[in-house]
Amino acid sequence: MVLSKGNKVISYLEILFLCVLVECSIWTSPDFRIFAQRTDREAHDSAARSNIQYSYSDNETGENIEVVLPISKGYAHGKIAYFVATDASNNETANSIFESTGWHGNFAPILTLLSNSELSQGFEFLNGIRGPGAFGFQLPVASSTPDDENYSPLVHLNLVRWNDNVTISLLKSTPEIVSASQKGDLQIIPTNITINSPAVSWYRSEP
């Protein structure tokens, strides 16, 4: 696919608008919080929503209690993996998690104090190939899973925007995104959003 519009540089106001929009939708949407284990196109095009259900009996009351934790999917190292969001670095995002999923996301402003080296990186696409991502394009990409030495469940969100007049493709890993950026095919736009989004299921490499 080739984008054929005239080239345009993202302005500061545009980036600011996108960051605000992300705070209200991206990480609060299940589409960005989780990533699973099929790698075919069907897996990419399927809805990026699911739930983890757990039932237990309260010892004091005998009542059966069911906990439903919303998850969503994306890519990590070229494979599908699942994640869940529990905490957000700003209150608006934490509140939006509840509004979107019914799950009470925790407001954790201390996340903003962490250095970038302590975080995994997440990438959400603003344009490109249509799919079940938060903006209606391909699934998001995470930089690491628990199999990696540098894994962190704390994810710094980046927006990805393909430039005009380039051939776009489905990207499934951080190196692919970085390489495309270095070639001038796309822009990586950091946000000020950090989410506690641990992996719950991912493709495991052979020992």
Image (cartoon, rainbow, N blue to C red):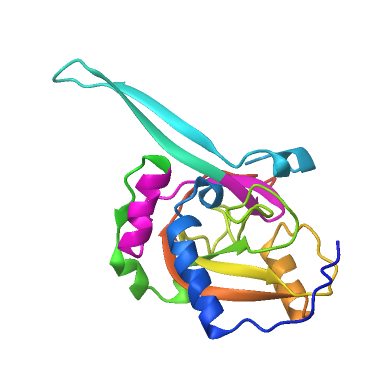
Count of numbered badges drawn on the protein: 0
Residue 133 rendering spot, x and y as whole percentages: 62, 52
Residues 42 and 129: in front is 129
Against 198, residue 62 (above or below) is above
Q: Residue at x 68, y 38 (%)?
A: 46
- Image quadrant in which you'd find residue 43: top right
Residue 12 rendering spot, x and y as whole percentages: 53, 84
Q: Residue at x 46, y 46 (%)?
A: 84
Instruction: Say whether residue 96 is magenta.
Output: yes
Q: The N terminus appears in which quarter of the rendering?
A: bottom right
Residues 91 and 71: in front is 91
Q: Furthest-left residue in view?
A: 60
* Residue 134 is at least partly visible in this image: yes
Residues 119 and 93: in front is 93
Q: Furthest-top residue in view?
A: 62
Q: Residue at x 58, y 59 (%)?
A: 144
Residues 195 and 130: in front is 130
Magenta part of the chain = 73-100
Residue 30 rendering spot, x and y as whole percentages: 50, 46
Residue 65 rendering spot, x and y as whole percentages: 28, 23
- Image quadrant in which you'd find residue 111: bottom left
Q: Residue at x 51, y 66 (%)?
A: 157
Against 49, residue 86 (above or below) is below
Against 29, residue 188 (above or below) is below
Against 141, residue 17 (above or below) is below
Tell whether 47 sits left or right of 164.
left
Tell whether 174 sits left or right of 111.
right
Instruction: Say whether residue 54 is magenta.
Output: no
